[in-house]
Image (cartoon, grey):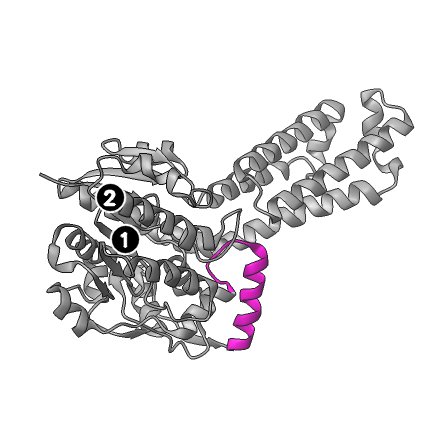
């Protein structure tokens, strides 16, 4: 009979794969996630509990969730603070509160999924290490896993960025010489290790570095990914490290995507582990990178995802420019430019002026909301309503605009489509 296992971060790339594996092994799963409805739809046979590791930093938040639980696996993680997420809360404060609750309730087996680049000079590494250090100082039967690059049929974060780089047309860009090192492990092979760490007593009180059997450079990985995705070989192109650093700072400001100063520092530190030491400690034999990829051939959706990851910043920037320019024009253009249309609504000249300025301010607010990734679903719906409202309103006031050579209303159709695409791309989970 399987154990009852509580999993945090279960909606993530590693977490979801792990839940599927543990269910296959006959375990009973309780998943703690921020959006329980989505998780329950994906896994109808598990118990899903709402929880937010940004907020659940006290033992009292975890104790009720641990009733009847035999083991705990902490998969939660973020690269850096963004979208209201606190890196230190998610990596240190909330896990430590969870570990304390486990200790008080007598739950001995706790598996902590950390990172191999734990020594990097980043808050990501320091916060992960703080939780690792607390756990390893306890008397529980803990297991700390520090995997190298984890890849699979799906992707998220760094692996999504790698896929996007791999499918670049004409040239594949490299960060510097592309000599950053990894010992990549397939997510299914990592799940083998986690499943064993939960079930087998011999894993207790060990720090392990799950990794594949070969050390590879970024150049090697991108070449294999491009081949797997079905794209013809193209030359590699070295992007100066200093320029990549500037782009990473832009990524910090944008608040989305995988290229940030943190990810760059983690790359610089290195993500390689010792394959022989891992295999000797566990008896497991992870697959080579090329073998694991070929076992799950890329489909059209993989190629779409890689390309859309590349296009996502362009879609985002296009909408910001659209609404910002529309807003500025609404505020700066002479009222006489709007009067013929707005007078059709029965507005006086003063009323037309206020309406034009009001629309301009609202457009600027929309540009700011997109820039800050503020509630993408709501922001997207507002854009759809606004563009649709503009189109219907202007059609009723001046239907001849549809016949204008420059198509001032016709252009709203692709704009509506672009907003819909942006809404899909913003849904990362």
Q: Is 239 rendered above or below residue 313?
A: below
Q: Is residue 293 visible?
A: yes
Q: Nearer the viewer, residue 268 or 257?
A: 268
Q: Which numbered dot is residue 61?
A: none
Helix, strand or loop for disc 1: loop
400 in magenta: no
Q: Position of residue 53 (x, y in %)?
A: 42, 45
Q: Quadrant of residue 408?
A: top right
Picture residue at 39% right of the left edge, 38% below the top? 61
Q: Is residue 333 left or right of residue 260?
A: right
Mark 1 neighbour density, 10 Å: few (under 14) some (14–19) many (20 or more): some
Q: Position of residue 158 (x, y in %)?
A: 40, 60
Q: In the image, which residues are magenta?
A: 240-260
- Dominant SS in magenta: helix
Residue at position x 42%, y 68% in the image: 266
Which residue is label 1 attached to?
Answer: 153
Q: Circle 2: is it few (<14), some (14-19), or many (20+) Cα within 10 Å?
A: many
| In the image: residue 334, left or right of residue 235 | right
Q: Is residue 171 visible?
A: no
Name the spot of residue 140 as percent of width and height, x first. 23, 54
In the image, residue 39 sits, relative to residue 77, either above or below, namely above
Give me the residue at 60% from left, 40% from top. Answer: 415
Q: Quadrant of residue 126?
A: bottom left
Mark 2, residue position: 19
């Amino acid at each position: 009979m399987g154990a009852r296992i509580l999993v945090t971060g279960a909606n993530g790339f590693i977490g979801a794969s792990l839940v599927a594996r543990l269910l296959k092994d006959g375990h009973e799963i309780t998943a703690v996630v921020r959006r329980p409805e989505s998780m329950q739809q994906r896994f109808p046979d598990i118990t899903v509990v709402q929880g937010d590791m940004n907020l659940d930093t006290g033992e009292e938040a975890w104790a009720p969730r641990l009733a009847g639980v035999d083991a705990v696996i902490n998969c939660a993680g973020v690269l850096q603070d963004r979208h209201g997420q606190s890196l230190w809360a998610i990596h240190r404060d909330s896990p430590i509160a969870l570990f304390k609750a486990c200790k008080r309730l007598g739950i001995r087996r706790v598996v902590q999924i950390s990172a191999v680049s734990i020594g990097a000079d980043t808050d990501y590494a320091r916060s992960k290490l703080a939780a690792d250090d607390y756990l390893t100082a306890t008397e529980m039967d803990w297991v700390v896993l520090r995997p190298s690059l984890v890849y699979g049929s799906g992707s998220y974060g760094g692996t999504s960025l790698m896929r996007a780089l791999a499918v670049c047309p004409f040239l594949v860009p490299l960060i510097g010489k592309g000599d950053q090192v990894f010992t990549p492990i397939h997510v299914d092979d990592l799940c083998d290790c986690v499943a064993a760490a939960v079930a087998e007593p011999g894993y207790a009180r060990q720090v392990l570095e799950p990794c594949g059997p070969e050390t590879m450079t970024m150049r090697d990985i991108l070449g294999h990914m491009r081949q797997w995705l079905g794209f013809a070989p193209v030359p590699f192109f070295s992007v100066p490290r200093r320029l990549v650093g500037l782009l990473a700072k832009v990524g910090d400001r944008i608040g989305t995507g995988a290229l940030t100063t943190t990810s760059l520092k983690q790359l610089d530190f290195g993500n390689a582990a010792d394959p022989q030491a891992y295999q000797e400690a566990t008896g497991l034999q992870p697959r080579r990178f090329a073998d694991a990829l070929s076992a799950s051939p890329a489909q059209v959706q993989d190629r779409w995802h890689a390309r859309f990851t590349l296009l996502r910043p362009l879609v985002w920037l296009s909408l910001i420019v659209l609404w910002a320019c529309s807003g500025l024009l609404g505020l700066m253009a002479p009222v006489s430019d709007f009067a013929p249309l707005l007078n059709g609504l029965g507005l006086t000249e003063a009323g037309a002026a206020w309406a034009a300025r009001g629309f301009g301010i609202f457009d600027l607010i929309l540009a700011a909301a997109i820039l800050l990734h503020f509630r993408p679903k709501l922001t997207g719906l507002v854009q759809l309503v606004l563009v649709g409202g503009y189109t219907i309103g202007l059609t009723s006031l001046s239907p001849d605009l549809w016949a204008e050579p420059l198509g001032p209303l016709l252009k709203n159709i692709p704009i509506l489509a672009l907003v819909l695409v942006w809404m899909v791309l913003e849904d990362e989970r």
